[in-house]
Image (cartoon, helix red, strand yellow):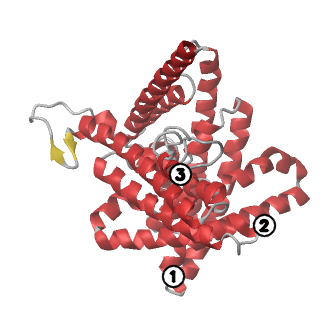
Amino acid sequence: MLGKEVSATDDFVKGLWRENPVFVQMLGLCPALAVSNTAINALTMGLATTFVLLMSGISVSALRKFIPREARIVSFICIIASFVTAVDYLLAAISLELHRSLGAFIALIVVNCLILGRAEIFASKNTLSRSVLDALGMGVGFTAALLFIGVVREILGSGSLFGVALFPDNFQTWTVMVLPSGGFFAMAMWLLVVNWLKKQKEAAEKQAQEAAA
Amino acid sequence: MSDASHWSIFLNSALVNNFVLAYFLGLCPFFGVSAPLGTAVRMGGAVSFVMLVASVCAFSINLLLDAINAPYLRIISYILVIASTVQLVEMLMRKLSPPTFRALGIFLPLITTNCAILGVALFQTNRGYGFTSSVVYALGAGAGFALALVLMAGVREKLDLAEVPDLVKGTAAALVVGGILSMCFMGFAGLGR
């Protein structure tokens, strides 16, 4: 990287790993744990959140010059709530079954701190194209994190993946993973993996520095 | 509705379907604020209070929205009305009762956009509760939230002194504790039915 110039790819890529909303920033934990009991629920939730993130990012960034500073949070919430309502009705039209299994959690996207956070920190200060990239990166990072948790919970808890049975009939399912406590455990496990990877990388960088010196 | 069913609504929202440990609502204060025990108690009180306000607001808004047949305005009007009512209550409290404000007031702005608050409003609407049932539901949810927060604060105070590997320290350990607490609350399943 050259100086302070931030490349377009960096706007997108940082959400995937370095500033991953769930595993690194710990934002939007509530939906990440609540609806990740199956992979398909996790994927739907992730996509719905990405859509709201993207649309509100575009709106906030496009309107950033017209929104008075004092009333910005209220304006952001109005924008976000409108898109959440749209997603709520959209999902009900696409699949009533999925809509029912996600329940009120679709409506609760509106209070996901990730979305308001990105609107406040990024979209309200940056150009439209950068905001789109940022929102997409964060959205994909969020979806991936949800999917990671959902896949682990579904494989262990129900012995299937996206509803397809993986194991022979005599597989003893870990019922605890489908229950709420399973969400905490799966998340803790992924955090350990992420922490371990980060530590490995730091150690490698340190070694490289020492070797260079 | 009889008293018995109100009691079961209370038990249900406080223990069986605890907002934090079964529905995963309001995790940010649960993990983010590793508050000492005293603060956790006051925070729990503040959350219960806001939940009550939100529940009453949501019930009135719902009546209005049904009357004008505009359910698609639900999400946006809930959050705006709840946020502004809490702000109003905060101002009134500062004026009328400074001691209560000092105890609860600092948390109020933080809590307003907490998902547990909107969760109470949305769940009571989805279940079609009447006025008293809604209020009882909100009280139960608040009590359950406070209970979970206090339990967590107590465990974390001990956890700070324990020797845990570097890798697990912080949120990972807190998550495992949350998981175990949630498993304990599974024991309440079937109660109050």
Packing grade of label 3 (10 A; few <14, some 14-19, many >=20) is: many
Looking at the picture, which amino acid does disc 1 mark?
A: Asp
Packing grade of label 2 (10 A; few <14, some 14-19, many >=20) is: few
Q: Position of residue A110 (x, y in %)?
A: 54, 62
Q: Is residue B193 visible?
A: no
Between A168 and A144, the one nearer to me in the picture: A144
Residue A70 image label: 2
The C terminus of chain A lies in quadrant: top right
Q: Do labels 1 and 2 share a chain?
A: no
User: Circle 3 — which element?
Assistant: helix
Looking at the picture, which amino acid does disc 2 mark?
A: Glu
Packing grade of label 1 (10 A; few <14, some 14-19, many >=20) is: few
User: Circle 2 — which element?
Assistant: helix
| Nearer the camera: disc 3 or disc 1 | 3
Q: Are marks 3 and 1 on the same chain?
A: no
Q: Are marks 3 and 2 on the same chain?
A: yes
**In whole angstroms, how far apart are the C-alphas of marks 3 and 2?**
27 Å
Q: Residue tagged by mark 3?
A: A11
Q: Is residue B158 left or right of residue A169?
A: right
Q: Where is residue B108 in the image (x, y as percent from the top left)?
A: 73, 53
Marked residue chain, label 2: A
Residue B66 image label: 1
Are dots 3 and 1 in contact, CB under 8 Å? no
| Residue that appears at 40% across and 54% down | A46
| Nearer the camera: disc 1 or disc 2 | 2
